[in-house]
Amino acid sequence: MSEDLSMEMEHIGSRARSAQRRLMCLVPSGKNNALHCMGEFLRRDAGDLLRANRKDLRMAEESGRDEAFVDRLRLDEPRIEKMAEGLEQIAALPDPVGEITGLAYQPSGIQVGKMRMPLGVIAMIYESRPNVTADAAGLCVKSGNAVILRGGSESLHSNMAIAERLRAALGKAGLPLDLVQYVHTADREAVSILIQMDRHVDVVIPRGGKGLLARIREEAKVPVIMHLDGNCHVYVDSDADSGKALKIVVNAKTQRLGTCNTAESLLIHRDRAADLLSPITNALQEKGIEIRACSESLPRIRDARIATEEDYGMEYLGPTVSLKIVDSLDEAINHINHYGSQHTESIITENYAHARRFLREVDSSSVMVNASTRFADGFEYGLGAEIGISTNRLHVRGPVGLEGLTLQKWIVLGDGHIRV
């Protein structure tokens, strides 16, 4: 392990801890002003951000990255505007820090309750998407946390340009610049050091491929909010409305291919295969989607390939979907719970009892009725933005917004009370 790199990372962690403690005494208006400045600086310097992004895009294309990867990496003016809007939406949200809940008198006369407080210093490790830089910084500042950002080497120029504007905005707003720090080196060793700095880092949040997540799970000495892959399902029930089914399936799979909330698996009840299998698969193929189908449906779908066991558990992040005909709601639920990644699942049905069972029995962080899986997103959930989608069972599950970046401590109010 490089001694120079280790010292550099320790210095980053120490500065983050110092900056976060200064943030604890800041009133909400100060944080909101900083978020508005961040949005303003991103809009102002959009041309510079696009120029930096073109360097990353050129490198990705020269290295033979696929279209879905390049799309995740790409910035354009609408995406920059959405980053700025996300920061402003975060500013408009209620500040969770300092909120007191459950305050109640006890028989002794003391009042006991809980107060919401920041997690502290968050290390955000991510790949591909430059918008994560702005989303993570905005959410962490609003929730009273400092953040150390380490994006993938493929988006280095874009991330550095965005982080530079965010830090400049903090300075204009009078906040410590070290609330947001970006690890400039592409050296993988920096990640290993960062996720073991339990003296300076309180939580690690990774977003990326299975290799990155497996590595962090194995090496981290700091608690991890895990964002696993998104093998999301849409189940077309026996009582599905045909128009809704066609519209939702196509949107869930094709609205954007390279995101974790894109549908990767399609289940169709046998009673609806006769009238819906062909319209749905034809519509998907018209959008360029390759279908990997079960043995029963394969002869009825042109140019389909047979699905393997691996396909049913796959997050494709590209123009491929697995398809299976199922006999019942029970089989659909069992299939999802077996092959899914506990991310997002949707049922298309007009049957209230079936919808309720699906909501109750499917073990995922977001479960939907008659809606596209593409809605599993912090912005769409009214969180302003998200720092990730947690598939953990502890602390937080689903899109992680402001409240997910805080915890609660017990508070006790007395008036000279002593225990006897």
Image (spheres, helix red, strand yellow):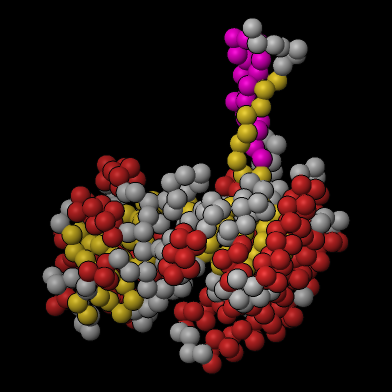
**What residue sits 23% from the left and 80% below the top?**
304
User: Is residue 333 depicted above or below 149 in this figure?
Assistant: above
- Image side of residue 215 versus residue 171, left or right: left
Residue 262 x, y percent position in the rendering: 42, 66
* Residue 140, quarter of the rendered image: bottom right
Instruction: Answer left or right for 320 relative to 146.
Output: left
150 vs 314, left or right, is: right
Q: In the rendered structure, which segment of residues is drawn in magenta?
A: 100-117
Q: Looking at the figure, which quarter contains the N terminus?
A: bottom right
Residue sitting at x 26%, y 56%: 338
Q: Residue at position x 65%, y 81% from top? A: 53
Q: Residue furthest top?
A: 420
Q: Which of 335/195 is in front?
A: 195
Pick whichever, 315 or 149, lies toward us. 149
Q: Position of residue 147 (x, y in %)?
A: 67, 58
Q: Is residue 138 visible?
A: no
Q: How many marks?
A: 0
The chief SS type of the magenta part is: strand
Question: Can you give x and y, in whole percent of width and height, for residue 29 in the image?
Answer: 80, 47
Residue 212 seen by the camera: yes
Q: Quadrant of residue 180?
A: bottom right
Residue at 37%, 69% in the rendered image: 315
